[in-house]
């Protein structure tokens, strides 16, 4: 009975949530993620000769294994071929993946290979439910009453839920308009000055906002933290570099794990990947723009926001 329960729980990890979606899959796969690769694993399928791997990164489903996958039941997806050249396609794209087992059948003097049913699907949509949070209504659905993980800012200046919801939408939209008009999220290093801008703008307007430095998955990243009624939240306006059309991301720090399907969770099962990891935190008065042409541009954005 326990074995059956375990199998049912594992199979349910990447199943469609809606009864109107495609039929529930019976072949589970799981994944670990980084900012630029996805590694999937799956159980043996009886009598399978090998496996084909399929991915969609925005231009239709394509087979991405260049040769049959016969051993280890493991595949790491980094590259795709485009006009004879290899391109990195994971970072900056929404990627979904699944596998199909292939079976061999003797046919006269030849062998016929046929694909079986496709597996469950995983994706790198790490921000499901927490992306494009631009208004207070969406924000209110994310706010929680308690943080279960340890605090990293026990002495932080907090904002009450009512005050935060009264102002968040206006402030986020003002910042987002600057971001969309002027910032390329793939511009290396943009996350540092922009998270500085966010920290100073929110704090200037009465919502204490910290700048954090650390990693997203395993890549250096700078983002923001706000504390609302004793709960710490990640606020990330440059998340588009990881998953397009995601910023601003607003997510409880407890939920900063991508489970084996790629969904954010506070209780990851099976394989999982830590998302936001924090190494250093600065208050708004501890950060400043440097004296470079690029930094002065960000200072001008901030000045325009606060009306100087």
Image (spheres, rainbow, N blue to C red):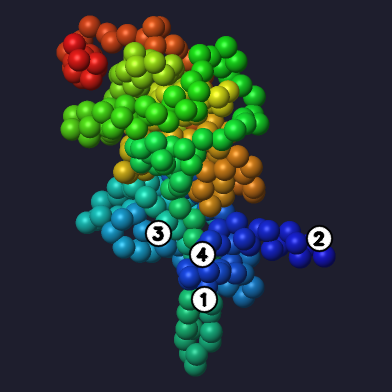
Tell me if label 2 and label 3 are in contact, CB under 8 Å: no
CA gap, disc 2 and disc 1 = 29 Å
Viewport quadrant of the C terminus:
top left
Q: Is residue 167 visible?
A: yes
User: Which of label 2 and label 3 is nearer to you?
Assistant: 2
CA gap, disc 4 and disc 2 = 26 Å
Tell me if label 1 and label 3 are in contact, CB under 8 Å: no
Which residue has dot 3 on it?
55
CA gap, disc 1 and disc 4 = 24 Å
Q: Is residue 167 above or below residue 58?
A: above
- Mark 1, secondary structure of its residue: loop
Other residues around mark 4 within 10 Å, as few (<14) / some (14–19) / many (≥20): few
| Horizontal and vertical percent position of residue 62 | 35, 63
Seen from the viewer's position, the closer of residues 296 and 87 is: 296
CA gap, disc 2 and disc 3 = 34 Å
Toward the bottom, the furthest residue is 108
Which residue has dot 2 on it?
2
The image quadrant of residue 47 is bottom right
Other residues around mark 1 within 10 Å, as few (<14) / some (14–19) / many (≥20): some
Which residue has dot 4 on it?
18
| Horizontal and vertical percent position of residue 80 | 33, 53
Tell me if label 2 and label 1 are in contact, CB under 8 Å: no
Q: Which of disc 3 and disc 2 is earlier in sequence? A: 2
Which residue has dot 1 on it?
116
The image quadrant of residue 9 is bottom right
Seen from the viewer's position, the closer of residues 245 and 204 is: 204
Name the side, left or right, on which 240 lies relative to 2. left
Write the residue at 50% across / 14% down: 157
Q: Which of disc 1 and disc 2 is earlier in sequence? A: 2
User: Which of label 2 and label 1 is nearer to you?
Assistant: 2
């Amino acid at each position: 009975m326990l074995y059956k329960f375990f199998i049912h729980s594992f199979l349910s990890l990447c199943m469609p949530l809606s009864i109107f979606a495609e039929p529930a899959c019976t072949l589970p796969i799981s994944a670990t993620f980084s900012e630029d690769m996805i590694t999937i694993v799956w159980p043996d399928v009886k009598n399978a000769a090998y496996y084909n791997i399929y991915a969609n990164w925005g231009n239709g489903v394509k087979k991405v294994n260049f040769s049959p996958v016969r051993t280890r039941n493991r595949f790491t997806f980094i590259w795709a071929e485009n006009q004879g050249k290899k391109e990195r396609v994971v970072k900056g794209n929404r990627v979904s993946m699944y596998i199909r087992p292939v079976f061999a059948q003797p046919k006269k003097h030849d062998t016929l290979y046929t694909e079986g049913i496709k597996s469950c699907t995983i994706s790198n949509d790490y921000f499901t439910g927490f992306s494009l949070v631009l208004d207070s209504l969406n924000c209110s659905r994310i706010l929680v009453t308690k943080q279960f993980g340890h605090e990293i800012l026990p002495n932080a200046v907090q904002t009450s839920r009512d005050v935060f919801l009264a102002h968040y939408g206006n402030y986020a939209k003002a910042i987002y308009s600057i971001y969309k008009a002027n910032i390329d999220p793939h511009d290396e290093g943009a996350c540092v000055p922009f998270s500085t801008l966010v920290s100073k703008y929110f704090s200037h307007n009465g919502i204490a906002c910290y700048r954090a430095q650390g990693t997203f998955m395993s890549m250096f990243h700078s983002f923001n933290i706000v504390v609302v009624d004793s709960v710490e939240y990640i606020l990330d306006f440059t998340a588009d570099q990881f998953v397009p059309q995601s910023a601003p991301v607003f997510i409880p720090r407890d939920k900063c794990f991508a489970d084996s399907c790629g969904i954010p969770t506070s209780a990851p099962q099976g394989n999982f990947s830590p998302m936001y990891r924090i190494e250093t935190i600065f208050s708004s008065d501890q950060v400043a723009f440097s004296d470079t042409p690029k930094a002065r541009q960000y200072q001008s954005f901030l000045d325009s926001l606060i009306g100087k």
